[in-house]
Image (tube, rainbow, N blue to C red):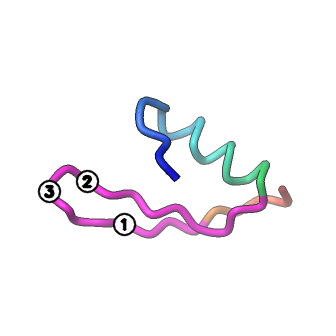
Amino acid sequence: MELGGYDVSSVQEYARNKGIAQIAWIKADGSKIIESVNGNG
């Protein structure tokens, strides 16, 4: 899902609200960070 243009906290809140367990942040250079999302959705 493309969520470009949103700030980090908005994406994290969206993930928590939808029950999404992980976010993959992809940087412009192609490197990635997998973040676990905590919350009760």
- Looking at the picture, how far across and down is residue 33, in whole percent? 36, 66
Give, as a three-letter code, the residue at label 3: Asp
Q: Along the line of sight, which residue is nearer the eye, 4 or 33?
A: 4
Number of other residues with Cα within 10 Å of mark 1, as a class: few under 14, some 14 to 19, many 20 or more:
few
Number of other residues with Cα within 10 Å of mark 3, as a class: few under 14, some 14 to 19, many 20 or more:
few
**Dot 1 corresponds to which residue?**
33
In percent of the image, x 79 and y 48: which residue is there? 17
Which residues make up the magenta segment?
19-36
Relative to 3, 28 lies left or right = left
Circle on res. 13: none
The quadrant the C terminus occupies is bottom right
When the figure is inspected, residue 35 is found, relative to residue 15, above or below; the finding is below
**Dot 3 corresponds to which residue?**
29
Q: Determine contact: label 2, label 1, CB under 8 Å.
A: yes
In percent of the image, x 56 and y 38: which residue is there? 9
- Looking at the picture, how far across and down is residue 21, in whole percent? 67, 69
Q: Determine contact: label 3, label 2, CB under 8 Å.
A: yes
